[in-house]
Image (cartoon, helix red, strand yellow):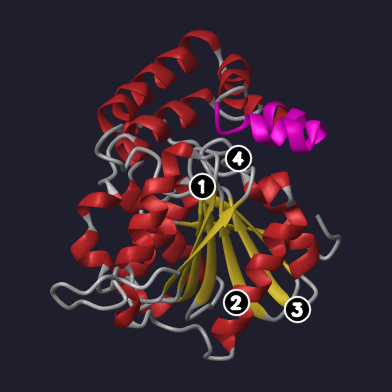
Amino acid sequence: MDAAEQRRTVVTTDGVRLAVAETGRGAPVVFLHEYAGDQRSWAGQVADLAADHRCVTIAARGYLPSEVPADPAAYSWERAVDDVVAVLDALGLESAHVVGLSMGGYTALQLGLRHRDRVRSILAASVGSGSDPATRPAYLAETEIVAAELRARGADFVGRRMAEGPSRVQLRAADPAAWDEMVAQFAEHSVEGLANTIVEVQGRRPSLHDLVDDLARLPVPLLVVVGDEDEACLSTGLLLKRTVPACGLAVLPNSGHVPNLEDPRRFTDLVRWFQGLVQAGAWPERDPRSRAVLQFDLEGTESLAG
């Protein structure tokens, strides 16, 4: 990252030390990484945005160089939300734009639901794995399997298996070096941190499909970004578009679960475009009339072909 990066430690409300990095000056934007990533996953975005943004990256608890609590009870999706608030408080930020990928996107949405005044906007990318009712039982079973495999075979083995999965092969095709780097970085993670995170955070968080009533009242500007080959997240992306009043949906062609790595510039351009509209007060709520399916809702009248 940029030489101007400043690193600090933030202590959470339950005493866990989090590694936080700041780069640049301007509108504050907080980046929340995915399960298989860490602070380094946002290097491409920070390098570009730091010219006019105060970019903040957080290593989630359980991810080095943050502290790795041994007690599984120290991990939960609620703690993940509280940790972001602790960082905002420590940095003196009343509010910030929040960009989250996958696990980080889920945290960003819950942050918006629970602390609306702290969030200027949310860009949630690849969010919703395990939320679709059709695949949720298999997803929950997989969290336990992954934890067991981590403890039995290590992060190097599990990371490579995950990187060869159906929503990450797109990265290998787009940028083999970035794929290799993702695998290598996963192998450096704490096994206990990863195992506790996937069981206690990923495996116990509510499905977004069960939160539609809350999400329908979310007033925060939201952009959902999903790859068209990220099968685990497509249905939830559409659900959020249909539910959250001020939600836009960007579906990226031929893309998987890590669009920030597959095409960093394209992803950064989306961040800049979205936050620019929000800053200008130009990000709209959905017009209720757009929810109609037919052009004319009169008995016996055919819809107009279009």
> Between marks 4 and 2, how big is the CA–CA gap?
23 Å
Instruction: Tell me which residue sits at (44%, 76%) in the image.
Output: 221
- Eyeballing the image, is 172 above or below 129? above
Q: Kindly identify the amino acid type of the residue bearing the numbered disc 3.
A: Asp
Q: Which residue is mark 4?
A: 37
Q: Residue 275 — which label?
A: 2
Q: Quadrant of the C terminus?
A: bottom left
- Eyeballing the image, is 113 above or below 36? below
Q: Nearer the viewer, mark 3 or mark 1?
A: 3
> Between marks 3 and 4, how big is the CA–CA gap?
25 Å
- Eyeballing the image, is 9 above or below 197? below
Q: Quadrant of the N terminus?
A: bottom right
Q: Is residue 168 magenta?
A: yes
Q: Residue 52 — which label?
A: 3
> Between marks 3 and 1, how big is the CA–CA gap?
25 Å
Q: Which residue is more in the foreground, 1 or 271? A: 271
